[in-house]
C-alpha cells in the first residue's frame, strides 16, 4: 500500500491506496476553508499551522495500515512553500520510521490522475487544468511526457472567481459561491470584454476581466437595490467564453481526441456544459473527475504514487525538496 499526503495549499489530506488494485482504501481531508474565509483568501502562515495540527490527526487514523506500507507519496511541488513543507516533512518522518521509499509528486500531475482514481490511466490526453493556482492546457502522452501548450499570463480561472467573490463579500473559496449566485442571473446583462479576444496568442488572462467586474460592482453599489447576481452570471459567462474561444483556436491545429478538465474549478457545471458543447464539433471524448476529486485531495496523489512506484520513481530522503514553482 501507498500512504499519500497532500498539503500544497489549504487542504490537509491523507490517503491509502492499494498498489496492485489501485483501490482507494482510505481518504480523509480536513479543509481550512472556514478559517481562511474571514480573510477572503488563503493566509500562508495560518495554513501551515493548521496543516501541522491536522496531518498528525489524520495519520493516527491510518495506523492499522502501517505494517503494509511500501512507499509514501507526497505533493512536493507546486504550492505554498510553507504548506508544502508540512507534508514533505511528515513524508520524510514516515519514510524513516518504516524504512520505505519516498515518491515526490507534482501536484499538477496529481490533478491529471484525479481522472483515474481506482482506474487504469490512459493516454494521450489533452487536459485543461483549472484551479486556484493554474489555468493551463497540457498535452499528456504519459506519466513523464507532459507538455504545457497554453497557460495564464496573470491570474488563474479559479483565482478570478475567488477575487470576484471577495469583492462581493461572499467569502472563500469564491468558485462555488459565484457559481451559485450566477445561477438564474442574466449572463448577457453586463457586456464584459472577452480577454485577449483579438490576440492571436493561445494564452489566458483574467486580471482585466476582474478589473472590469470591480468597476461594474462600484456602479451597481450606487443603486438602491444592487443586483450582484447578473454581474456574477456575466462574469462566469465571459470567464468561460475566454477558455472556450482559446481552446477553439488551439483545436484548429491540434484536434482533440480525448479531452479532460481537471482541478478545483472543473467542478463548475457551467464550464463543464460549455466544454461539452465545444467538443461535440470535434467528436471528441470528454473525461471528468468525480466532483469529490476535483479539488485538492490525497487520493489523486496516491494514484500518481502507484504509477510512480511501478516505474521506481523514488526520491532519496536528502533529495526530496518542496518547491513552490512547478517545472511543468
Ligand atoms: O485544485 P484546487 O482545489 O486548488 C488548487 O490547486 O489551486 O482549486 C481551488 C480553486 C479555487 O480557486 C476555487 O474557487 C475554485 O477552484 N473552484 C471553482 C469552483 N469550485 C472550486 N471555481 C469556479 N467554479 C466552481 N464551482
Ligand atoms: Zn490543486
Image: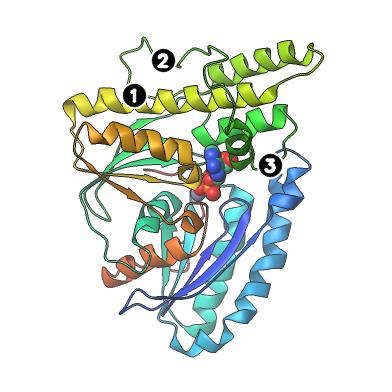
The x, y position of residue 254, in whole percent, is 19, 31
Q: What element carries label 2?
A: loop
The x, y position of residue 290, in whole percent, is 43, 57
Q: Mark number for residue 196?
A: 2
The way the protein has been coloured in the rendering is rainbow
Q: Do the residues labelled 3 and 2 touch (CB within 8 Å)?
A: no
* Comes first in the chain, label 1 or label 3: 3
From the Cβ of disc 3, is ligand 1 less than 8 Å away? yes
Residue at 21% across, 53% down? 123
Spatial CA distance of label 1 from label 3 is 28 Å
Residue at 68% across, 46% down? 44
Residue position marked by numbered label 1 in the rendering: 246
Q: Do the residues labelled 2 and 1 touch (CB within 8 Å)?
A: yes
Judge by depth and name the residue closer to the eye, 20 or 324. 20
* Comes first in the chain, label 2 or label 1: 2
The x, y position of residue 22, in whole percent, is 34, 73
* Comes first in the chain, label 3 or label 2: 3
Q: Rate crowding at label 1 as few (under 14), some (14 to 19) or many (20 or more) other CA atoms within 10 Å.
A: many
Tell me if residue 321 can be seen. no
Spatial CA distance of label 3 from label 2 is 27 Å
In this picture, residue 255 sits left or right of residue 324: left
Residue at 56% across, 53% down? 8
Residue 160 to residue 172: above or below:
above
Q: What is the quadrant of the N terminus in the image?
A: bottom left
From the Cβ of disc 2, is ligand 1 less than 8 Å away? no
Residue position marked by numbered label 3 in the rendering: 172
Amino acid at each position: 500500500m501507498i500512504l499519500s499526503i497532500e498539503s500544497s495549499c489549504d487542504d490537509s489530506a491523507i490517503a491509502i491506496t492499494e498498489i496492485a488494485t489501485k483501490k482507494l482504501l482510505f481518504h480523509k481531508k480536513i479543509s481550512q476553508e472556514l478559517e481562511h474565509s474571514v480573510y477572503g483568501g488563503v493566509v500562508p502562515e495560518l495554513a501551515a499551522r493548521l496543516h501541522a495540527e491536522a496531518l498528525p490527526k489524520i495519520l493516527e487514523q491510518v495506523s492499522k495500515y502501517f505494517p503494509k506500507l511500501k512507499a509514501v507519496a507526497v505533493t512536493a511541488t507546486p504550492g505554498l512553500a510553507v504548506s508544502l513543507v508540512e507534508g514533505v516533512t511528515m513524508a520524510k518522518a514516515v519514510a524513516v520510521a518504516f524504512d520505505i521509499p519516498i515518491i515526490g509528486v507534482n501536484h499538477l500531475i496529481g490533478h491529471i490522475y484525479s481522472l483515474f482514481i481506482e482506474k487504469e490511466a490512459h493516454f494521450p490526453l489533452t487536459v485543461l487544468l483549472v484551479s486556484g493556482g493554474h489555468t493551463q492546457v497540457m498535452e499528456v502522452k504519459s506519466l513523464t511526457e507532459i507538455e504545457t501548450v497554453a497557460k495564464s499570463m496573470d491570474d488563474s480561472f479559479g483565482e478570478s472567481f475567488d477575487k470576484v467573490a471577495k469583492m462581493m463579500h461572499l467569502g472563500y473559496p469564491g468558485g462555488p459561491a459565484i457559481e451559485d449566485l450566477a445561477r438564474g442571473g442574466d449572463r448577457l446583462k453586463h457586456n464584459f470584454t472577452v480577454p485577449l479576444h483579438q490576440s492571436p496568442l493561445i494564452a489566458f488572462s483574467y486580471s482585466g476581466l476582474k478589473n472590469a467586474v470591480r468597476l461594474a460592482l462600484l456602479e451597481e453599489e450606487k443603486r438602491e437595490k444592487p443586483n450582484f447576481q447578473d454581474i456574477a452570471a456575466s462574469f462566469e459567462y465571459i470567464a468561460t467564453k475566454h477558455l472556450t474561444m482559446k481552446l477553439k483556436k488551439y483545436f484548429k491545429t491540434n484536434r482533440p481526441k480525448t479531452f479532460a478538465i481537471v482541478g478545483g474549478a472543473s467542478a463548475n457545471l457551467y464550464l463543464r456544459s460549455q466544454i461539452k458543447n465545444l467538443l461535440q464539433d470535434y467528436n471528441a471524448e470528454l473525461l471528468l473527475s468525480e466532483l469529490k476529486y476535483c479539488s485538492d485531495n490525497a487520493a489523486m496523489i496516491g494514484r500518481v504514487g502507484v504509477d510512480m512506484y511501478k516505474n521506481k520513481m523514488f526520491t532519496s530522503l536528502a533529495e526530496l525538496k518542496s518547491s513552490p514553482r512547478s517545472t511543468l
